[in-house]
Image (tube, helix red, strand yellow):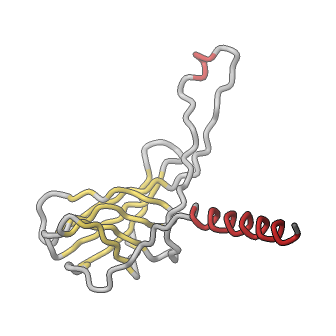
Amino acid sequence: MKILKLISIFIITSTLFFCCGATKDKTIYKFQKNPPFKIVDAVVSDWVGGQPGVRGLKVEISTDSKKVKLDTLYFRNQKTTLKLTANTTPSKYVGILVTSNGINDYILDKDSTKEFGNFPKIISKNIPFNLNNNEAVISYLYQNETYFYKIKIINKEVN
């Protein structure tokens, strides 16, 4: 009887450990060391919007290849889509990140129509990479496959 209890406890605990391990995210991002393109320039600059408290970062990345399409930028705990500017040589991609803290004045009233114009705060998304303040990760498409490449230094543009 004691052996049956020990076996059942062992089976239950081992099942719990295997189930907990199976729920973890198995996505692993492998960085490419030799991508099929070269980063010609990577510049970040501040921008300020037309309304108080609206500001962010504009990241411009230039590459020497037209065969590769840059897709997503991960920078300073945010993620944005990179957009190709007009046909330029080298190819230039731009990503816009909003960094304002969003100090919003909310109108609270019994009449919900008076609350029109209240906007939720922008919450920073956690990205799946550990990056320093001057590092970024770009995802790119090459031959219908998605790859990741880490940019070591992004130069700060002086205004």
Q: Is residue 138 left or right of residue 128?
A: left
Residue at 34% across, 59% down: 95
**Of 3 and 116, which appears nearest the observer?**
3
- The image quadrant of residue 62 is bottom left
Placement of the N terminus among the 4 image quadrants = bottom right
**Of 16 and 117, which appears nearest the observer?**
16
**Of 138 and 40, which appears nearest the observer?**
138
Please, which residue is most extreme toward the bottom here? 33
| Spot occupied by residue 113 in the image (x, y as percentages of width and height) | 58, 16
Residue at 15% across, 57% down: 86
Q: Is residue 98 left or right of residue 60?
A: right
| Spot occupied by residue 126 in the image (x, y as percentages of width and height) | 54, 60
Residue at 57% across, 38% down: 120
Q: Compared to 87, does 14 lie above or below?
A: below
Q: Is residue 28 left or right of residue 101?
A: left
- The image quadrant of residue 136 is bottom left
| Spot occupied by residue 105 in the image (x, y as percentages of width and height) | 63, 35
Q: Compared to 101, does 3 lie above or below?
A: below
**Of 154 and 14, which appears nearest the observer?**
14
Number of numbered tags placed on the structure image: 0
Placement of the C terminus among the 4 image quadrants = bottom left
- The image quadrant of residue 94 is bottom left
| Spot occupied by residue 133 in the image (x, y as percentages of width and height) | 51, 74
Please, which residue is most extreme toward the right here? 2
Q: Is residue 151 left or right of residue 63?
A: right
